[in-house]
Every structure is written in C-alpha cells, then in structure tokens.
Image: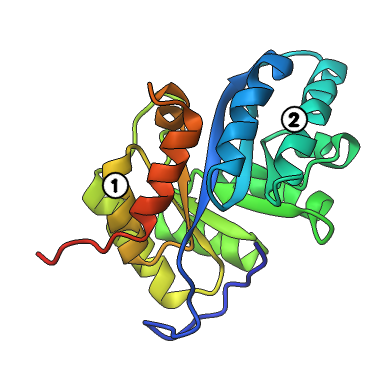
Amino acid sequence: MPGSSTQRQPNDATSQAPRLYLTTPAVGGPAEFAPALAEAVKAAEVAAVLLRLADADERTLINRIKVLAPVVQNAGAALVLDGRPELAARAGADGAHLNGIAAFTDAVDGLKPARIAGCGGLPTRHDAMLAGERGADYAMFGEPDASGRRPSFEAIVERVAWWANLFEVPCVAYAANQDEIAALAEAGADFVAVGDWIWSDPRGPAAAVAAAAAALKTPEPAA
C-alpha cells in the first residue's frame, strides 16, 4: 500500500477498482478463529487483513500473530496489526495500523520502509494531511472510535471523495454494512474495509466476503 501525499488530478485515469480490507474482531483464541479467517481470505480478492488482538502478555500476542499470519499471507494478503507496531517485525506481520496522528508519528520510523504504516483516527482534514506528509501508506476514514461512534455516512463519503481527488496516498474507507460499500467505492476509495458484520453473517464469512466483493463492482445509482 505505498503512497505519498503528492496531489493528483481529479478523476485520475490510473485509478483502479477498490479492493477489500478485512478487519477482525479482537482475537483471543487464534486456533479457533483461523478456520473462519481462512474462509474469508479465500472467498474473494483481499488486499489486507487488520488483526485486532485481545489483551495479553507480549509472548502470547506474538504467538497469536504467528498462528494467523500464514493464513493471511498465503492467500496473498498483507497482515496488518491494529496498533502494537513493536511486534510487527518480531511476529512476521506486514505492518501496523496506528490510531491517531500522535501514535502514527511515534511509530512510523520504526516500521518504514520495510513494513506498512497505516493511519486511522483522523477526525480532521489537517490530521489526514499530516499523516500523508509523514509517510502514511494509507489513510483510513469512517471507522468507529473506541466507543463505537463514527461520523455521519454523508460526511464519510465527502471526506473520502476529497482525499481521493487530491492525494496519491491510498484511502481506506470503512463500511459499517454491505449497503455502504458501493457509495464508498464510487467516492474513490482505494480500499473498502469491512468488519464485524462479515464475521457475524449467518451465511458464514466466505459468503459475506463474496457479497462484499460483488458490491464493490455494483455502480451506485444516480441521484
């Protein structure tokens, strides 16, 4: 997910169709979660998986990552840790996602250039631009905060469109449900992140991921 904050022309003809970015629940038992994860990453083209981990001691966290990293990487996707940048190299992850410009600034030099350094938790345009200038490999918009709140969907679409039209750093747009995917893709997201609803879908994660991938290719109806 390389990128720079250099401005680009609106409607850049080199842009490609967006790809999926899976986010996991907080994983405590990797062996129990691995089969569902394997189903999900094989169901469609997945660019990356954001691995959230339940709290534990450092050795336990590393062991969990080492169990799940091959599941993701063998499917051709990148494994990105939710925080915990100090564990990325030691556990064989491809990078880390940092929440907020302060956390990102503290961690980016330890991750790059060998590993992905992504940034979310960017409530203002200024914060997003700072992340891009500091070397973020992507900026994420629309994800819930620690209490589950997120901006209005209209505000998320507007932020994604603004970023996509002006900056070369890839944009990850968070879809809270399948119905949001097409609009985020239409707004110019390079990646669409999907999370809890994938894992709780009664059809199973493979079917949910396949449906999400199909929604990426569904044009948003004209207003």
Q: Amino acid at mark 2?
A: Leu
Residue at image x 32%, y 64%? 187
User: Label 2's element?
Assistant: helix
Give me the C-alpha separation between circle 2 and circle 1.
28 Å
Q: Which mark is residue 52?
A: none
Q: Please tell me whether residue 65 is drawn above or below residue 107 in the rendered image.
A: above
Q: Closest to the observer: 4 or 170?
A: 170
Query: How many tags in the picture?
Result: 2
Please give the residue where the numbered disc 2 appears in the rendered image.
Answer: 68
Residues packed near mark 2 inside 10 Å, few (<14), some (14 to 19) or many (20 plus): many
What residue sits right under mark 1 in the picture? 180
Q: Position of residue 203 (x, y in %)?
A: 39, 26
Query: Circle 1: is it few (<14), some (14-19), or many (20+) Cα within 10 Å?
Result: many
Q: Nearer the viewer, residue 76 or 134?
A: 76
- Give the residue at the far left of this rendering: 223
Of the numbered discs 2 and 1, the one sitting upstream in the chain is: 2
Res. 72 image quadrant? top right
Q: Is residue 128 visible?
A: yes
> Residue 94: x, y in percent?
77, 47
Question: Which quarter of the image is occupied by the C terminus?
Answer: bottom left
Q: Residue at x 53, y 56 (%)?
A: 139
Query: Residue at image x 34%, y 31%?
Result: 149
